[in-house]
Image (cartoon, rainbow, N blue to C red):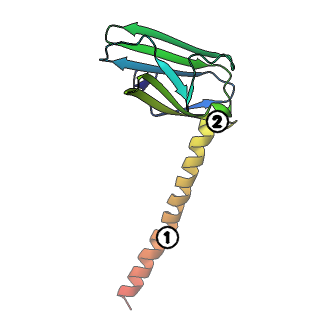
Amino acid sequence: MIVDEVGDPLQEKYYEIDSTLQLSCVVRNVAMTSSVVFWKHIDNILNYDVTRGGVSVKTELMEDGANSTLSIAKISKTDSGNYTCSISEFQNFTIVVHILNGESFAELHHGGASGCRNSWWHLVVLLPLLMLSSLRGEFS
């Protein structure tokens, strides 16, 4: 599985443009018949990508599995998408990577909270009006 810094599973991750993408894949309870953990971006195998530069794959093989880390320096929007760590055709783990173009994480969260605040404001205004309308109906 693809994990964060403390070993919790991840399904998606956010990075800023020009930062370094770093993904960790942990495979357990698998006899390592192959000595290679492959990393793919969409359908491109990254282990041997010499055209781009800044791509690094480090894999530690163990008796019952492997730990593998993919690093990509100076990422851009084209680095967004699905990344897959695979041992064989049957052992694949995928994560969705989002590359932010100048937006900060705080701005993304603020934008989401703003929509929530607007909904809350509508509720605060409409609820008393509905209650008043209901009361008028009872006394008519």
- Who's the residue at 39% across and 80% down the image? 134
Front residue (pair 77, 31): 31
The answer to whether the residue labelled 2 contacts the one labelled 1, judged by CB atoms less than 8 Å apart, is no
Give the crowd class for mark 2: few <14, some 14-19, many >=20 residues within 10 Å.
some
Q: For residue 60, which numbered disc appears in the image?
A: none
Q: Residue 103 location, x and y as percent? A: 66, 38
**Label 1 Cα crowd, 10 Å radius (few <14 / some 14-19 / many 20+):** few
Tag in front: 2 or 1: 2
Q: Amino acid at mark 2?
A: Leu
Q: Identify the residue at horizontal 52%, vertical 59% (top origin).
A: 119
- Circle 2 — which element? strand
Using the rendered view, name the quadrant where residue 138 is placed: bottom left
Residue 139 placement: quadrant: bottom left
Which residue occupies the foreground of this view, 82 or 73?
A: 82
Label 1: state its secondary structure.
helix
On screen, 30 above or below 94?
Answer: above
Q: Rounded to the nearest whole Å, what is the CA distance between mark 2 and mark 1?
A: 37 Å
- Residue 81, percent from left and from top: 57, 35
Q: Which residue is mark 1?
A: 126
- Quadrant of the frame with the C terminus: bottom left
The disc labelled 1 sits on which kind of residue? Answer: Leu
| Dot 2 or dot 1, earlier in sequence | 2
Return the x and y of residue 106 as percentages of the image width and height.
60, 37
- The label shown at residue 100 is 2
Whether residue 140 is visible: yes
